[in-house]
Amino acid sequence: MKQLALSEFLADVSARKAQLGFDEGAEAAEARRNKGGRRTARKLMILQRTEQRAHAAGCEPVVSYR
């Protein structure tokens, strides 16, 4: 098995993104998000608990579509 340091992997990913002209702006990232149209009840429950835990910890919850 080939071993690869995380720093090498991340450098390679960054180089490939730059080569492809990958847009990581907020608008482009939002366009790629899963809009949640086919979420299962279990996944919705997980998202709700995650949001509740973020609020309880005083953190801003990650935006998730329901």
Image (spheres, rainbow, N blue to C red):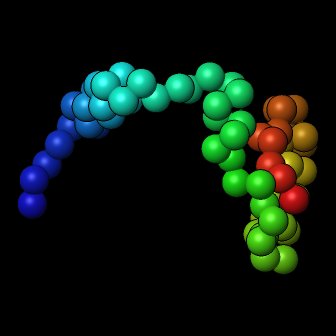
Given residues 30 and 7, the one toward you in this image is 30
The vertical placement of 11 against 6, above or below, is above
Picture quarter with the N terminus: bottom left
Residue at 46% x, 29% y is 22
Residue at 81% x, 42% y is 63
The vertical placement of 33 against 24, above or below, is below
Q: Position of residue 34 (x, y in %)?
A: 70, 54
The vertical placement of 59 against 35, above or below, is above
Splitting the image into 4 quarters, where does residue 45 fall?
Answer: bottom right
Q: Residue 54: in sight, yes or no?
A: yes
Q: Residue 53: in sight, yes or no?
A: no
Left or right: residue 47 versus residue 18 is right
Picture quarter with the C terminus: bottom right
Given residues 17 and 6, the one toward you in this image is 17
Count of numbered labels shown in the rendering: 0
Splitting the image into 4 quarters, where does residue 44 fall?
Answer: bottom right
Pick out the residue farthest to the left: 1
Splitting the image into 4 quarters, where does residue 41 fall?
Answer: bottom right
Given residues 33 and 55, the one toward you in this image is 33
Residue at 30% x, 31% y is 16
Left or right: residue 48 versus residue 2 is right
The vertical placement of 57 against 48, above or below, is above
Q: Position of residue 14 (x, y in %)?
A: 35, 26
Pick out the residue farthest to the bottom: 41
Q: Position of residue 4 (x, y in %)?
A: 17, 43
Residue at 25% x, 31% y is 12
Q: Position of residue 52 (x, y in %)?
A: 90, 50
